[in-house]
Amino acid sequence: MHSGNHSIKKCHALLPTAGTGSRLGGELPKQFQQLAGKPMVSYALEAFKGSAQIQSIWIGVSSGFIGNPILGTITNTGADIHVVATGGPTRQETVRNTLAAMLKAGIPEDDWILVHDAARPGITPALIEKLISAVQTSNSGGILAVPLADTLKQADLDSVVAGNIPHSERTIPREHLWQAQTPQMFGLKQLHDALEDAIRLEADVTDEASAIELTGAKPLLIEGAARNFKVTHPADWELMQLLLSSHAKQ
């Protein structure tokens, strides 16, 4: 075993689930809707429960959702799962609030936190473990991401603003471009403070890594997998349903 702090830092999962999933519609927020036979968030929970390195799982929900019976069905598994009413008006505030709750609960501030989108049910224990083993000896943290394969086009802004069919203005070189996924893995206090600063400065942070980048750190990019895509639109839902159903039959 290595000496030093790296060997004693534990890993915890954080799933912000306070969003409404408005683009998909439906009665429940999308992360709790039934996907291939169970609530979508269950797939991510199972992947983290299947990873031996994950000590605890924290789910941040909006305060109005805390009594919903569906929470009992997804957390009644014997694993160390905490549901906390830390939902904020934005994803970043939900994450920051949940990190604050973890610090308050006594999770060591140097422990690793893996923040994951509940709307990425294609995550697997193997991908989680790949991220952990690559990142746990670094100081900068890291994220799952995939190199861009498609040709990128920039649309003309006038058409977009006017709501017309856009024209392609130019092709953007895709070398060095990666598509961010989750989990995104950073130190507990490091991430809490980076998000606190970003929120205070009203910076445009779209994921945890962008808050960390604002501090000058350079997170590692660990290659993820196509199956770990985000379910945002109805077409994504259908594709993920196919993927998870065929996986279950194997």
Image (cartoon, helix red, strand yellow):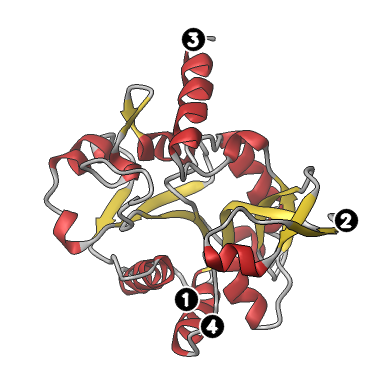
- The circle drawn on residue 175 is 2
Q: Give x and y (percent) for residue 94.
A: 36, 67
Q: Say which residue label 3 marks.
A: 249
* N-terminal label among 3 and 2: 2
Of circles 3 and 2, the one toward us is 2
Q: Give x and y (percent) for residue 17.
A: 34, 54
Query: Does the rendering let one see residue 197?
Result: yes
Q: Are marks 3 and 1 in contact (CB under 8 Å)?
A: no
Q: What is the distance, in whole Å, between disc 3 and disc 4 at their CAs?
A: 45 Å
- The circle drawn on residue 203 is 4
Q: What is the distance, in whole Å, between disc 4 and disc 1 at their CAs?
A: 15 Å
Q: Are marks 4 and 2 in contact (CB under 8 Å)?
A: no
Q: Say which residue label 1 marks.
A: 192
* N-terminal label among 2 and 1: 2
> Which amino acid type is shown beneath numbered disc 2?
Glu
> Which amino acid type is shown beneath numbered disc 3?
Lys
* N-terminal label among 3 and 4: 4
Name the residue at 41% across, 65% down.
91
- The circle drawn on residue 207 is none
- Kind of element beneath mark 2: loop
- Kind of element beneath mark 1: helix
Name the residue at 38% across, 73% down.
93
* N-terminal label among 4 and 1: 1
Whether residue 30 sits left or right of residue 195 in the image: it is left
> Which amino acid type is shown beneath numbered disc 1?
His
Name the residue at 44% across, 44% down.
119
Whether residue 185 sits left or right of residue 199 in the image: it is right
The crowding category of the residue bearing disc 4, from other C-alpha atoms within 10 Å (few below 14, some 14 to 19, many at least 20), is few
Image vertical order of residue 37 relative to residue 219, above or below: above
Image vertical order of residue 243 relative to residue 174, above or below: above
